[in-house]
Image (spheres, rainbow, N blue to C red):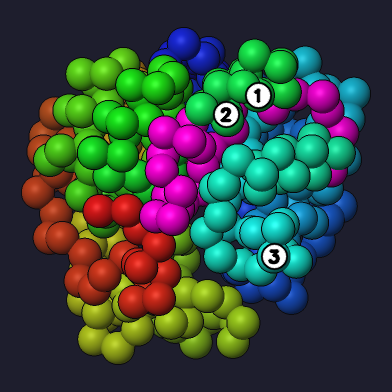
Amino acid sequence: MKHIKIGGLDVSRIGLGAMSMSAFYNLAERNDDESIRTIHRAIELGVTHIDTAEVYGPYTNEVLVGRAIKGRRNQVVLASKFGLLSHTSSGSRITDSSPANIRMAIEGSLKRLGTDYIDLYYQHRVDLQTPIEDTIGLLAELVAEGKIRYIGLSEASPDTIRRAHAVHPLTALQTEYSLWSRDPEDVLLPLLRELGIGFVPYSPLGHGFLTGEISSPDQLADDDWRKTNPRFTGENFQRNLRIVDEVKAVASESDATPAQVALAWLLAQGDDIAPIPGTKRVARVEENIAADQLELSIDQLERLNNLTPAFGERHEEGAMKFIDR
């Protein structure tokens, strides 16, 4: 597995997002033993970058990841996130990045993860009630105390990124980026490169859509959050299948899977991009990691670059309200 630098942090070029092991996707399929085997297999194949958050579950995903990395902590760049749970308000699911809340959040995450430091600690969503300068100031204190090593933001606007970076250097920005979510290319990516901040795309497979395995919304369980995602509903779903058809065509030419093509395209966008495809299955993590060896031709990259944009907003209206734009 190749390695790259995001900010000053060395990570495997492909990481592992652990969210779906405990939350949001087909919850009836949860299998902690298989998830732990998946994390172990990823580490065996050279993945060092594992991403979780306190809100996944909530809390249960950090516990799971902590179990999986026990005895393997020095092999892992561990990332977690705070800010979508308010510990000062009995665990309410609201944005809260006040210094007092962060203090409570970090202690809980360290305990659940079974470690005394987190390598990369993200603000999960921007808290409009707390100046970003106050949030980053507290995170800088945690760096000085050795409880975290690097600071990241998730779904932050260019203005927020600049203001935060002026207080303490940011290491990474996490935002959705894939063949059907190209928004970061216009402003965010140039800004990150100007400031020397790495980019960690989440949902690089379009919440599973780009794998080509989902041909009908009926395949999704009723408690799967994608049931209400605009890109998975109504006419948008059928229109977005055409994007997958093009990805499948390139995959057929390359003796690869659509997921591998989608990841290889993303890796070709720069050596400062470290996607974290999520899965809860060993076979899928093996498939995803093999994308590190796939080289797409100039013609294939051009065809993928010119795919029709996805139809529908990338999150439903309520979730989009938490996106700092």
Q: Quadrant of residue 84?
A: bottom right
116 lies above or below 109: above
Determine the CA span between mark 1 and mark 3: 22 Å
Q: Please give the residue where the numbered disc 2 appears in the rendered image.
A: 139
254 within the magenta span: no
Q: Give the crowd class for mark 2: few <14, some 14-19, many >=20 residues within 10 Å.
A: many
Which structural element holds mark 3?
A: helix
- Per the image, the residue denoted by label 3 is 89
The residue indicated by pointer 1 is: 142
Quarter of the view holding residue 72: top right
Badge 2 or badge 3: first in the primary sequence: 3
Residue occupying the point 81% across, 61% down? 31
Residue 131 in the magenta stretch? The answer is yes
Q: Residue at x 49, y 87 (%)?
A: 218
Query: For this rendering, which residue is in front, 248 or 30?
Result: 30
Residue 149 in percent (x, y) is at 62, 18
